[in-house]
Amino acid sequence: MNVEELKRIREKSQKEMDLRSGEKAIKVVVGMATCGIAAGARPVMAAIKDELAKQNAKDVSVTQSGCAGFCEQEPLVDVFRPGETKITYGKVNPDKARKIVVEHILGGRAVNEFIFAWEK
């Protein structure tokens, strides 16, 4: 391994850490309790982080939560955009997750056909 390869690995790791920590303008929370993991939450979280990286997204944090009590709707993804209503997407798969990133998280338009709940 040369210095340039190590720098690329470091940059990639830093971007990954930036997505998982810190207070950012937009917050995405993936349900990662046993029920969520069994329903496919790990590939959903990976797809969200991958799409955010591909889109070179800034000011977005991706975290995880425990069980929300809606196991039949897992994997669940909550999107918190400043000044907007929290939206919870249900039965999310990696393809839906990528669409949510592009249209809602980055584009500001909720993906109505995937919404499970929202706070008023």
Image (cartoon, rainbow, N blue to C red):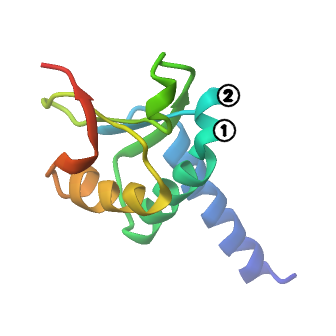
> Which one is in front, 108 or 60?
108
> Which one is in front, 92 or 23?
92
Gap between marks 2 and 1 measured at Cα: 6 Å
Residue type at the position of mark 2: Thr
- Identify the image quadrant of the N terminus: bottom right
Circle 2 residues within 10 Å: few <14, some 14–19, many ≥20: few
Identity of the residue drawn at 66% across and 38% down = 38
Residue contact between numbered discs 2 and 1, judged by CB atoms under 8 Å: yes
Q: Helix or strand or loop: what does disc 2 sit on?
A: helix
| Disc number placed over residue 34 in the picture, else none | 2
Identity of the residue drawn at 14% across and 31% down = 84
Choose top left, top right, bottom left or bottom right for residue 13: bottom right
Residue 69 percent coordinates (x, y): 48, 16
Residue 93 percent coordinates (x, y): 47, 54
Would residue 16 appear left or right of 79 to someone viewing this image?
Answer: right
Circle 1 residues within 10 Å: few <14, some 14–19, many ≥20: few
> Which one is in front, 104 or 26?
104
Residue 111 percent coordinates (x, y): 21, 51
Residue 101 percent coordinates (x, y): 33, 56
| Disc number placed over residue 107 in the picture, else none | none
| 81 up-or-down from 107: above or below | above
| 106 up-or-down from 117: above or below | below
Identity of the residue drawn at 54% across and 49% down = 45
Q: Which residue is mark 1?
A: 38
Choose top left, top right, bottom left or bottom right for residue 80: top left
- Identify the image quadrant of the C terminus: top left
Identity of the residue drawn at 51% across and 59% down = 47
Q: Helix or strand or loop: what does disc 1 sit on?
A: helix
Would residue 120 appear left or right of 61 to someone viewing this image?
Answer: left
Would residue 40 appear left or right of 5 to someone viewing this image?
Answer: left
Residue type at the position of mark 1: Ala
